[in-house]
Amino acid sequence: MSIRTIRQATLRSTSALGLGLLAIAACAPSAEPPPSAAPQTAEGTVISDIDQRLAKYSPVPLEPDLSALSARDRQALDKLNQVSNLINEIYLRQAWAGGPKMRQEIAAWKDPKARAARDFFAVNFGPWDRLDERKPFIGDTPRPKGAGFYPEDLTQADFEAWIAKHPEDKEAFSSGVTVIRRDGDRLVAIPYSKEYKEWLEPAAKLLNEAADLTDNASLAKYLRSRAAAFLSDDYFQSDVDWMDLDAPVEVTIGPYETYEDDLLGYKAAFESYVTVNLPAEASQLSRFKERLPWLERNLPIPDGMKNFERGTDSPIRVVDVASSAGDARAGVPAIAFNLPNDERVREAKGSKKVLLRNLMHAKYERILTPIAAKVLDPAQVAEVTFDAYLNEILHHELSHGLGPGTITKDGKKTEVRLELKELFSTIEEAKADVMGVYNILALIDQGEMPAALRSALEPTYVAGLFRAARFGVDDAHGQGVVAQFSYLKEKGALEIDGAGRFRAVSAKFPGAIRDLLHDLLILQGNGDYEGTKAFLEKYGKAGPELRAAIGRLSDVPTDIRLVP
Ligand code: ZN
């Protein structure tokens, strides 16, 4: 299992706040033998605990508030929701070539377990459990690492040998928007526009129709250029137009993340977010962007380690999701994202952060609140608020843009991520959790956020740590979450009563958060791999109290799934 496979299972869940590691490159996977025959689909091959697996996801209907939209924008939204259906069809094939056939087979099953199997297949876009390291829940065939992007028997070595012999193929083969297929003895790269023509052509037509309907010029421009990209495979201009998009209907549709490709990490998976913009919410949050230089200066590290180079002009949107599709709803759905990934667009225009309010709210109600009730001191349970949760998520995201990034080590210019290697994402997610709290406390002290937020902040953060810890305290990513518990406990900022309930100790909390952030940033600023390893070894092991508290959460769902 490569690092990326672990990340895939936990991609949207490793931080306390459940955010993705959206811009973090993965390590090179190793070559493995080709998988055997296609999974068995007989009804008897469904895993026995399928009902419990499905119950880990609380079903949530999407109920966006459309009242602010004009009649024409509502019609445009309907067209875009139809595009989401087409994106699901493409993604099912990207996740695994055998997906459509198996979906058809299980649709005819009559076994008592069939319904749960169908729903779980829909959540996972295939027969492999995304919350269980992609192990099979129908049949026993391992998931092909190259998903549906490559021939299933193709190894990394085969791919590299082909490129070595045919250097002229390198660009097309490593492109994010081609699939690799066999043509007799040859390997060929087929562009997405051709491979997925059956869905991309009607999708382009619907995008153009939606462009004709909307009165918003920036939306019409993006929809038309993205429609053209579906047919040309050139996404650059439409990514630029997406950055300029400022409309009542905020939409993100296309091939973006490459995590589904565990063979080489080249191929982008299709996804869509069709959403309704909530400008009032965004303007409340956007003012913090202007404070980023001050927040950088305020970090508890020597000035020489601070990073004043980074741009701060990236827009923030807060939206309600009307429909999402493909990669966006496979397994645990993300509650925020930061796009585009194209470095050329990021350099020219920055990137846009989009927070998905109705999904956050669903996770808050279905997951965070019941967790708080079971693990926090009863007096602190009532202090947990959605407002604190939303602010922690925003400041977690903003924190990824603060602190050491490009550093000098042994006289050489390098990057934190390169020096910390496979430990980087663990420590970076923990940093963003802790810095988010540190920054909110600092802004409260400055009078820029309400003092009333203080009492909600700490218990909401602790409940969030438990939410993240449930994805596994023993793997690499869980260690970053466990380390936050252990460190705060050591400093007296977390206490555990005789009934095993956790309480944030307000008198000690801000100081402990500051110290923890300092230690994490110093490890990053020095590019200190050995130090990071030692830190995670010291603090990253879950103790009996934490394990017992997590054990009490067994009947709280792990995450949400969107229905229909
Ligand atoms: Zn993050």
Image (cartoon, rainbow, N blue to C red):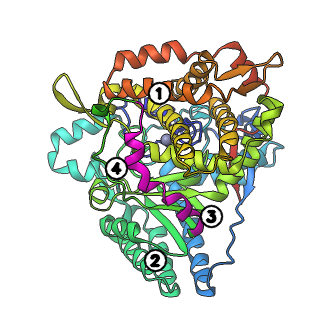
Circle 2 sits in a helix, a strand or a loop, which is it? Answer: helix
Circles 1 and 2: CB atoms closer than 8 Å? no
Q: Which callout, 1 or 2, points to the residue nearer the camera?
A: 2
Task: Tell me the kind of residue under disc 1.
Answer: Met
Compute the Cα span from label 2 to label 4.
Answer: 33 Å
Circle 1 sits in a helix, a strand or a loop, which is it? Answer: loop
In the rendered image, is residue 325 in sight? yes
Q: Which callout, 2 or 4, points to the residue nearer the camera?
A: 2
Give the residue number, with chain letter if any, for mark 4.
180
Q: Which callout, 4 or 1, points to the residue nearer the camera?
A: 1
Q: Main secondary structure of the magenta part?
A: helix
Crowding at mark 1 (Cα within 10 Å: few <14, some 14-19, many 20+): few
In front: 143, or 29?
29
Crowding at mark 4 (Cα within 10 Å: few <14, some 14-19, many 20+): many
Residue 325: in magenta span: no
Sooner in the amino-acid sequence: mark 2 or mark 4: 4
Compute the Cα span from label 1 to label 3.
Answer: 35 Å
Image coordinates of residue 282 in percent, x first then y, are: 54, 63
The part of the chain drawn in magenta is 280-300
Sooner in the amino-acid sequence: mark 2 or mark 3: 2
Residue at x-position 59% and y-position 57%: 356
Task: Tell me the kind of residue under disc 3.
Answer: Asp
Give the residue number, with chain letter if any, for mark 3.
320
Q: Which callout, 3 or 4, points to the residue nearer the camera?
A: 3
Compute the Cα span from label 3 to label 4.
Answer: 36 Å
On the rendered structure, is 201 left or right of 156?
Answer: right
Give the residue number, with chain letter if any, for mark 1.
1
